[in-house]
Structures are given as structure tokens and as C-alpha cells.
Image (tube, helix red, strand yellow):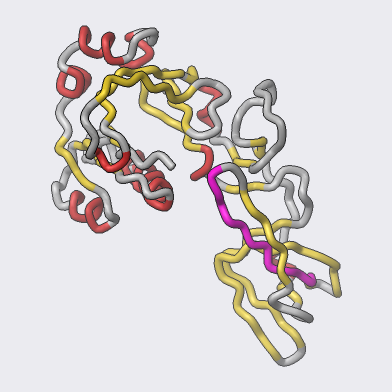
């Protein structure tokens, strides 16, 4: 497994807002579950926000102002990302990391995410909180159900349906049975080819508003843990059909 560090360039301040910083913290938590160290290259206001980043197990490097600070100027930017148009690079503000996005399950019927609901069996009660269930037969105004367990692995979601609440009925008012929107295999367009479907993900509305970029860059790779001697390496990420990370330029 590749455990090279990931650098996230995102700011959090009164001018640019804090939403992108929060989204990146969610991404960083997902990367840490795969044992990838994360560095935030950020301008923070107030600077005490750095404490929250570090409490989450991340590192913080103070960011500068734009491409000149990060890459040394437009010439260095072109050299670092050969084959990518400079205008696309400078308009790159969004990314879509599909494995960390909202889970959905294609045409599978009756899967519900319960934020909070009460299940009942006679005089016994159970509180369901932040629990995914497989809804089964309707009984009166309520539903029989089983617990729907999902474990995210590198190549797929592993699903188990377990009867942890035999005989219990969940409050029918908490079940809507609506089919999720924008639920596609791997979170990538239908024209992309794959041998089998390992997971589904929901896609945000802005994903189609920009231009997916495949970025190739030249780095000095030092191997897992950054302990080996530097070796020039060209790496690529993104593109329309990338199942992991899709940088998107030009989103307004």
C-alpha cells in the first residue's frame, strides 16, 4: 500500500470562508484510515485553527499567496505539471475523492440510513442512531428490518446484512424508501469501462460544472515513510475515469 504523504492546499479565513477547509478535514480523515499522512498547506485565520488540524492527526504548513509561493512562478508550475494547460491549473479549486463520498447502493432496494429512530418489539425498545438498515416487510405502519453493515476496502464496499434486532419493528415514519439521486458506479461517468462494480457513490451537483483534469507531475520520490534516497519519478492522478481522485478545474 502506498503511504506517501498527501499535501492539501486549502485556506480557511474570513475572506475565503471555511467550508473547503472542513471538506478537506473530512478527506484527511478518510486518508488517515488508509494510513496516509496529510499536510495542510493553509492560510488560517484565526491561527488557532491549526490546533484543530493537529488534534485530527494532521500537520500544518503555513500557506502563501497563490502559485508563485507554492511553485516558484509560472515557469516552475509548467515544469512541474507538464501537459496541463496553465489556465486549467490556476482555476483548479475542486476535487472529487469518490471513496470518501456518500455511500449508495445502485439498484438495491430498501437501504435506509437512520439518523435516529426507535424500534419496538412488544414492550422492548431499541434506539437506532446513525445506523444503516435493510428494510423488509411492512407490518401496520412500521417495518421489519435487518442491520446493513458496510466496510470500505481499497477496491470495493463489503456488505453484510445481519439480523441484530430479531422481531423488532422500526418506526415507519422514519422510513421513506426513496431511491437516491446521482448514485453511479464508482462515482464516475457511465462511459468509463470496468470489469465489475465494487462500490457506488453519490456525485455532487458541481461535478459536471467543471473540467476533469489528469495531472502528471515530476516529483522526487522517497518511498514509503520518506526514508529512501530521492529518485525522480513521474506520477499521474485524475481524469474523467479515475475512481479515486478527480481534480476539477473551472467550477464557479
Residue 82, picture quadrant: top left
Question: Along the line of sight, which residue is nearer the eye, 91 or 77?
Answer: 77
* In magenta segment, residue 118: no
**Residue 146 in the image: above or below residue 94:** below
Q: Furthest residue to the bottom?
A: 123
Q: Is residue 251 visible?
A: no
Q: Is residue 217 left or right of residue 66?
A: right
Magenta span: chief secondary structure: strand
Residue drawn where x is 66% and y is 39% of the image: 183
Q: Position of residue 37 (x, y in %)?
A: 30, 45
Residue drawn where x is 60% and y is 40% of the image: 202
Q: Is residue 210 left or right of residue 163?
A: left
- Figure quadrant of the N terminus: top left
Q: Is residue 32 visible?
A: yes
Residue 168, picture quadrant: bottom right
Q: Position of residue 36 (x, y in %)?
A: 35, 45
Residue 193, picture quadrant: top right
Q: Position of residue 252 (x, y in %)?
A: 42, 23
Q: Is residue 100 left or right of residue 228?
A: right
**Residue 184 in the image: above or below residue 108:** above
Question: Along the line of sight, which residue is nearer the eye, 90 or 72?
Answer: 72
Residue drawn where x is 26% and y is 49% of the image: 58
Q: Position of residue 234 (x, y in %)?
A: 36, 19
Residue drawn where x is 30% and y is 35% of the image: 223
Highlighted magenta segment, given as a residue range: 143-154
Q: How many marks?
A: 0
* In magenta segment, residue 150: yes
Amino acid at each position: 500500500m502506498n503511504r506517501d504523504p498527501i499535501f492539501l492546499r486549502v485556506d480557511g479565513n474570513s475572506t475565503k470562508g471555511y467550508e473547503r477547509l472542513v471538506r478537506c478535514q473530512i478527506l484527511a480523515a478518510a486518508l488517515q484510515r488508509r494510513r496516509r499522512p496529510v499536510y495542510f498547506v493553509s492560510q488560517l485565520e484565526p491561527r488557532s485553527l491549526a490546533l484543530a488540524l493537529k488534534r485530527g492527526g494532521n500537520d500544518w504548513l503555513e500557506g502563501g499567496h497563490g502559485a508563485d509561493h507554492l511553485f516558484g512562478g509560472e515557469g516552475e508550475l509548467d515544469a512541474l505539471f507538464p501537459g496541463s494547460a496553465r489556465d486549467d491549473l490556476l482555476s483548479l479549486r475542486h476535487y472529487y475523492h469518490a471513496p470518501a463520498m456518500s455511500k449508495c447502493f445502485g439498484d438495491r432496494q430498501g437501504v435506509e440510513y437512520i439518523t435516529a429512530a426507535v424500534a419496538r418489539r412488544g414492550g422492548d425498545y431499541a434506539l437506532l442512531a446513525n445506523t444503516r438498515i435493510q428494510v423488509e416487510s411492512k407490518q401496520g405502519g412500521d417495518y421489519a428490518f435487518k442491520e446493513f453493515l458496510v466496510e470500505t476496502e481499497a477496491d470495493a464496499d463489503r456488505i453484510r446484512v445481519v439480523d441484530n434486532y430479531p422481531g423488532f419493528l422500526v418506526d415507519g415514519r422514519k422510513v421513506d424508501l426513496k431511491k437516491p439521486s446521482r448514485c453511479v458506479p464508482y462515482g464516475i461517468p457511465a462511459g468509463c469501462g470496468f470489469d465489475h462494480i465494487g462500490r457506488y457513490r453519490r456525485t455532487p451537483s458541481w461535478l459536471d460544472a467543471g473540467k476533469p483534469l489528469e495531472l502528471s507531475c515530476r516529483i522526487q520520490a522517497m518511498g514509503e515513510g520518506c526514508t529512501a534516497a530521492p529518485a525522480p519519478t513521474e506520477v499521474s492522478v485524475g481524469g474523467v475515469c479515475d475512481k479515486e481522485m478527480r481534480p476539477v478545474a473551472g467550477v464557479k
